[in-house]
Amino acid sequence: MSLISLSISELQAQFRSKAVSPVEALEALEARIQAVDGEIAGYLNRDYAAALKAAQNADVNLPLGGVPIAIKDLINVKGESCTCASKILQGYRAPYDATVITRLKAAGAIPFGRTNMDEFAMGSSTENSAFAITRNPWDTDRIPGGSSGGSAAVVAADEAFASLGSDTGGSIRQPAALCGCVGLKPSYGRVSRFGLVAFASSLDQIGPFSKTVRDSALILNAISGHDPMDSTCLNEPVPDFTAKLGRDLKGVRLGMPKEYFVSGTDPQVDQAVRAAIKQYESLGAEIVEISLPHTQHAVAVYYIIATAEASANLARFDGVRYGHRTAEASNILEHYGRTREEGFGPEVKRRIILGTYVLSSGYYDAYYLRAQKVRTLIRQDFARAFEKVDAIICPTSPEAAFKVGDRSEDPLRMYLADIFTIAVNLAGICGISLPCGFAQVEGKPLPVGLQLIGKPFAEAELLQIAHAYEQSTNWHKARPVIG
Ligand code: GLN
């Protein structure tokens, strides 16, 4: 296998035996990016000189020593751009490192490259970026998913060994599914959000994209844990997330939610996921039918809570403190209005308007408060299910990657892309997507993702269950033909 296709674990073995140096790995990566990123547009920019310096000084005995990791363009890396793929933050440079970056660096990793995304992480296709549309490496006429589409595409196209993204309603798991890589959303409070530009603060979590389940565990090891800079980051013990990998599945119970196996899911996706469930049975897991009765309300609840929080969080972009400032204002109100009109794209404006509406007096109780109550019911659905099962198994996305432009005019249809991922964020629990097959669409194979949902703070068990399946199949070894 070529150098750029290696998993982190394999790359580290090469580093430690001195067969390959971190500088050589970075050079190979840069050559690959130059060869294929014109077609993929996964990166917004990268600082090769800075990464090279870090690679020259890398200590390969550290847990992620010398490993370059691509970063979604909404996580602050000191001195680098952090645009959130928005015109309003064009030219902005991060004044500090996010906690996840401080920790990656302490583990020896090299943050390398800023990946494209939907503006402020609002979207499911990466078409809402103000700068570029990222393409799916399996079929460049199609979207990579979103909002972390860049982070998923660069891993799938071997333009990165791994990357970080953020997941508010599915933005790690859905693009991982559509691009055919592993994507992990940790439990709420597992990973510090300090230095992550906030979309919906009660839902956002940072997590890894990788080529293997083990690599996601390695990255989670590095970035997890209490942080006094984020009061929602819990002071829970951080286990070694690789510790349970390789254990068998005897006695493991997996729940199949009946609400997630309904018509509306693409038949090829449904088939691939059912085949994965069979495979789990043959590995010794017990499959149990469960019910998550409030599932039908998840999308509606999410689009009230997420937009409400976004409207408050995005108030800080006022042209005074950050990024873009209008040239044409004669008074302060006009200054705010014009700056935001010029700086934000249409989807972000739609969300701010929706969020402001649901929070306004007279509507607050009918929408926001009611949504919070239903959120509690959704959380209870999962708590009840987890009395019976160790993890939940279902599709990540109801369909494989769709064509660029196919959904842009229909926001509601776009919102349904996250129908299987959103409830996990509302409940604050963890979820992972991993490759489980292909749909053949117009003569091309398009990846299908399997979602496993775990109990709060049970990432070690979730990774164990994911790893057992991965190791019994070859799906994670498939690569798109590109370049
Ligand atoms: N697609 C969902 C949205 O548009 C989720 C995005 C995310 O997880 N950041 O809000």
Image (cartoon, rainbow, N blue to C red):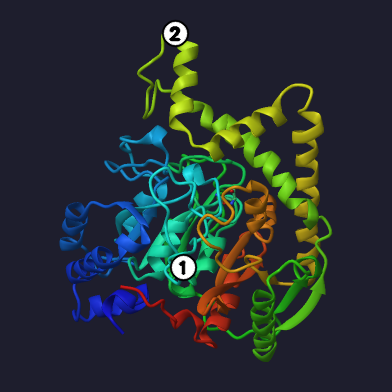
Numbered disc 1: secondary structure: helix
Whichever of callouts 1 and 2 sits on the residue coming sooner in the sequence is 1
In percent of width and height, residue 443 lies at 52, 80
Question: Looking at this rendering, what residue extends furthest in the top direction?
Answer: 331
Left or right of 188? Residue 60 is left
Left or right of 252? Residue 36 is left
| Residue behind mark 1 | 216
Q: Quadrant of residue 397?
A: bottom right
- Mark 2 is surrounded, within 10 Å at the Cα level, by few (under 14), some (14 to 19) or many (20 or more) other residues, namely few
**Residue type pointed to by label 1:** Ser
| Residue behind mark 2 | 331
Q: Relative to the observer, which residue lies in front, 342 or 167?
A: 342
Spatial CA distance of label 1 from label 2 is 50 Å
Left or right of 194? Residue 409 is right
Q: Relative to the observer, which residue lies in front, 52 or 218?
A: 52
Q: Quadrant of residue 62?
A: bottom left
Numbered disc 2: secondary structure: loop
In percent of width and height, residue 35 lies at 25, 67
* Quadrant where the image shows the C terminus: bottom left
Question: Residue sitting at 46 percent across and 11 percent down?
Answer: 332
In percent of width and height, residue 233 lies at 54, 46
**Residue type pointed to by label 2:** Asn
Question: Looking at this rendering, what residue extends furthest in the bottom direction?
Answer: 282
